[in-house]
Image: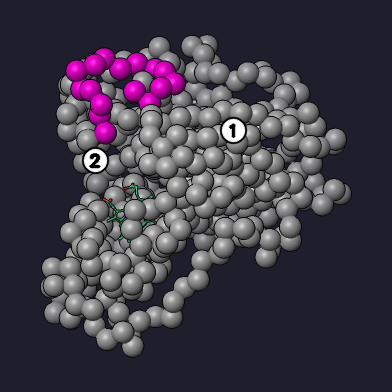
Amino acid sequence: MANGKSLTGTWRKIVLRGLSSIALLTFSGEMYAGGVNSNKPLTFSKDIAPIFQAKCEECHHPGTPAPLSLITYQDTRPWLAVIRDRVQKRQMPPWHLDKTVGIQEFANDRSLSDEQIDEIVRWIDSGAPQGDPKDLPPAKTWPSHSEWQLAKQFGEPDLVIKSDDYTVAAEGQDVWWRPFSQIPLTEPRWVRAVEMRPGTIAGAKVTHHALAQLEQVEPGTNPTPTPTLDNPGGFVTPGLLMEWAIGKNFDIYRPNTGKLLLPGSRIRWEVHYHSVGETIRDHVELAVYLYPKDVTPKYRTRLFAFQSSCGPACLDIPPNSIAQTQGFTVLKQPARIENFQPHMHLRGKAMLMEAILPDGTTRVLSYVDHFNFNWMNNYIYAEDAAPVLPKGTVLRFTAWYDNTANNPSNPDPTQWVGWGDRTIDEMGHAWVNVTYISDEDYQAWAAAQKARAPAPGSEGGAVVH
Ligand code: HEC
């Protein structure tokens, strides 16, 4: 396993070789543009404030849990060196995807462009001048905590489901709070959107992230879906309804697509709380927006936990080493892949999702190359970029774990690490929403794609077979 690093290296070289000449041309074009712009004097008011408004303020304004506000010049001043570092390493905004491979169009992309990073760094390196406050863009307003953000679009939610309260001590270790709430429905209903929030602004400070898992018995399926050695590939759950994390408040399903809620089902919450120096009591709440009673969407989207190893027993991470594991799942029907959300713990380093098509060609779908346990980012494909895959496609997930001292999150590189629930143990799967489609849908989709087929060799998100 000591050669884990070089495996990554080899893999990268293969991918780079596979890049189209078009992509390479664009890249050098941007480099050139950066060079030309480098004489332009940059100021906070004119150049930087618009970037911070677009890419940072949502999480960095007073009343959010982030440690700094990035609204005014005065807010920003004391943090320049840290901003430079976080931005240059692509740690902030949290978007830990390799931008050189795979699909790059997302519905929720919050990353900075190379040019924006370059501007922030050059502005700081040139003494971070304020410029003329008259150049500032109009201030943005952020929604108040008590409003449901989707109410503007859908009206008041049909259901609001709350977890039990929990008291987070002023000091202490992280807590995973896992209560249950019954879903008050007497007949099956389809969900078109969900929104989630901590109960209070104070609560948002201690809520690291929160999951609302749907627990329901699906007719004809195993009610306790757990990966086993017989069935290691992927296990299906009726759905994670929502994950809340700072900057991620709601999810709207695509047109004619939804999640099905059955009567008698319940929510299993998983709230990751951490102490912030004051005692705070709070809960999380989920707003559910339903399709009208007489509407049945054509497509049902379901959440899969695709395993990135051959099962729990295969996770074997020796001390002071980098380990690599792989897991495979065959798609039994044509399907659209909606998102990629790798899940690992503190040693998690990178995860790759590829599609091996029935003709043997392999496509990189997404590669998270600098995974960070604090940010379980969900990469949601843009409408036209979501890959549609034929029946028989093998999804291959590769995970890398860094159990060396080079990993700043590693609590102890001298320990052997195996599968387990605690953050000091490991896991490896990707949460992926899969929408199965019919063979006819797939044929129609493939015909439409061929009509506007991308140039041979270019890296399109969509996959035609
Ligand atoms: C999705 C929410 C989110 C976005 C978007 C975001 N941040 Fe952050 N940021 C956080 C949170 C939460 C923290 C504290 C936890 C951490 O460091 O991961 C943080 C930490 C930081 C820190 C480190 C502060 C410290 O104490 O070391 C800096 C600097 C920073 N962000 C700058 C930025 C900049 C600049 C942008 C935009 C270009 C940005 N962030 C976008 C949520 C966000």
Residue 410 included in the magenta stretch of the image:
yes
The residue depicted at 30 percent of the width and 59 percent of the height is 23
> Which numbered tag is attached to residue 105?
none
With 167 as the anchor, is 25 left or right in this view? left
How crowded is the residue under tag 1: few (<14 C-alpha within 10 Å), some, or many (20+)?
A: many
Magenta span? 409-424
Look at the magenta stretch and give its main secondary structure: loop
Q: For residue 155, which quarter of the picture?
A: bottom right
The residue depicted at 24 percent of the width and 16 percent of the height is 415
Seen in the picture, residue 91 relative to 350 is either above or below; the reply is below
Judging depth in this view, the residue of 66 and 20 nearest the camera is 66
With 93 as the anchor, is 204 left or right in this view? right
Seen in the picture, residue 313 relative to 358 is either above or below; the reply is above
The residue depicted at 33 percent of the width and 39 percent of the height is 371
Answer whether labels 2 and 1 touch (C-beta < 8 Å). no
Q: Position of residue 457 (x, y in %)?
A: 35, 52
Q: Position of residue 226 (x, y in %)?
A: 55, 18
Which residue has dot 1 on it? 269
Instruction: Classify mark 1: helix, strand or loop.
Output: strand
Which residue has dot 2 on it? 12
